Amino acid sequence: MDNTIFSGESKNIEYKVTLPDKSEKYMKTVIAFANTQGGKLIIGVDDKTHQVIGVESDILFQLMDGIANAVSDSCMPQIIPDIEPQTIEGKDVIVVSVEAGKHRPYYLKSKGKDNGTYIRVAGTSRQAFPEKIKELEMEGARISWDELTCVGYPVSENATEKLCQDIEKFRKKAGMTEYSVKKEQLINWKILKQSEGHLLATNAYVLLTSDYFPFSKTQCAVFKGTDRTVFLDKREFTGPIYEQIEEAVDFVLRNIRLGAAIDGLIRKEKYELPTEAIREMIINAHCHRNLLDESCIQVAIYDDRLEVTSPGGLYNGLTYEEVMNGHSKIRNKGIANIFSQMGLVEAWGSGIKRIVSTAEQYGLPKPRFQEFDNMFRVELFRNNSMTMAEKKDGEDSEKVRKRFGESSEKTQMNELTDTQKKIVELLCYDKQLSAKKIAEKLGLGSRSIEKNIKKLKTLGFLIRHGSPKNGYWEVTDCDTEEKNK
């Protein structure tokens, strides 16, 4: 018998002391397991103390039949769990094992696909956002969005030629085997498609050659202090995503300290953060982002850290532990392939491990990785441990910024409309307010409030955690903990 399943709740295990009267309460968990990476629901164990309470033996099989019927009646498409009794510490429990489903998305029949689709996030079952539902549909159909045809988008010879030449240049720069890249390779790599003598553009081709998609941006900013209240500089990069990566890396390097030490007769320059880790963070964000989410990639520099946030959590139920063990599930196959051909991705599944190891070699604190419902964030901490000599011989980020004519100290708050400021103020005091409630308090229409909330999310003022119904707002420029006491 597997005792590990009784060692505590995790992303893949959930306990119930008794079977809830309403099957919907545990059906959400069954659906979330099927939509993520499978899991076990254990009936007869206290979810708070993990104490084995057991199920009465005279109703054991009756309960098991009830669970099988409830799953069959409530879930779409059909989920067939493995339901078995196990004896632990002399008491009987029921173990409901659900496999990761192949016909996603699974949802509660009574609520329908839009409102009844659930996923597992950090050990809880949460309602899926619309963009996550779209992604689950594509997983179920075994499709990568970037490999789909971008209907009506023209394939131009100039854009194709530039992409081919750039791939060759990147290969040379990375010290890879040099070879001539032509449109035939782009067809083999599924970046271009052939149909009845015509060349069709995939979404990956569009992302690699243009600024056509409004969400394909890298927003970079430098903030004063350790939060987003006052920004010193901001830039927004668009165009081919590999160019965005280069520009974003350069932006970070311009805005962190460049120290220098004299080693013998040689002056050696060294940035306060490892360039390899910076590049890896930004490449990873572009390679693994959810392209069905209309948010942008954000790169933020604070006094104490570099933070890179990408839309979409870890893909297809992947856990942080699995990522650290070198597992890799590829969300964007076309882009991942081109990044590999360019030498931007060296080895699958090694990106996050490399960020951790380079930070360790640099003597930096351990990087932090955070997964929310619809985004993934990597934080690399600055320890400001450069010696005075290194700082003196190097350049401070302020000087560099001024030299580039990019210092523009002003408060982001000043750029907001009155309505947006009022929304921020209300959410500082009550982070669980719905758009409808905010509209009532401000005497405005719900649609207007939703539009302004979307704008505040894009500007980085608001971050949504949890499901639309039970989640809460994080306001990035007010001390919410203080105000919510």
Image (spheres, helix red, strand yellow):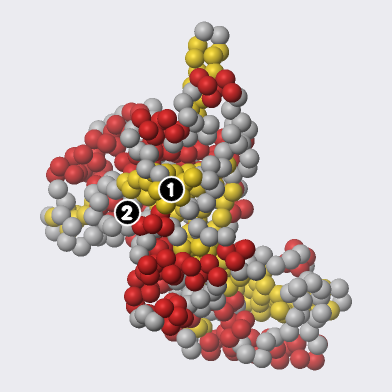
Q: Residue drawn at (24%, 41%), measured in percent from left and top?
A: 163
Q: Residues within 10 Å of mark 1 (few under 14, many from 20)?
A: many
Q: Is residue 349 visible?
A: no
Nearer the observer, 441 or 22: 441
Quarter holding the N terminus is bottom right
> Residue 418: where, in percent of width, then height?
37, 67
Classify mark 2: residues with Cα within 10 Å, few (<14), some (14-19) or many (20+). Answer: many
State the SS at label 2.
Answer: loop
Q: Is residue 266 above or below residue 345?
A: above
Residue 402 visible in the shown view: yes
Q: Which quadrant holds residue 201? A: bottom left
Mark drawn on residue 216: 2
Residue 217 horizontal side relative to residue 104, left or right: left
> Foreground: 59 or 126?
126
Which part of the image, by quadrant, shows the C terminus? bottom right
Q: Amino acid at mark 1?
A: Phe
Residue at image coords 50%, 58%: 477
> Could you say whether the residue bearing mark 1 is in a helix, strand or loop?
strand
Q: CA distance from mark 1 to mark 2?
A: 22 Å
- In percent of width and height, residue 25 lies at 61, 83
Q: Amino acid at mark 2?
A: Ser
Q: Is residue 142 left or right of residue 22?
A: left
Q: Nearer the viewer, mark 1 or mark 2?
A: 1
- Residue, disc 1: 231
Is 117 left or right of 236, judged from the image as shown?
Answer: right
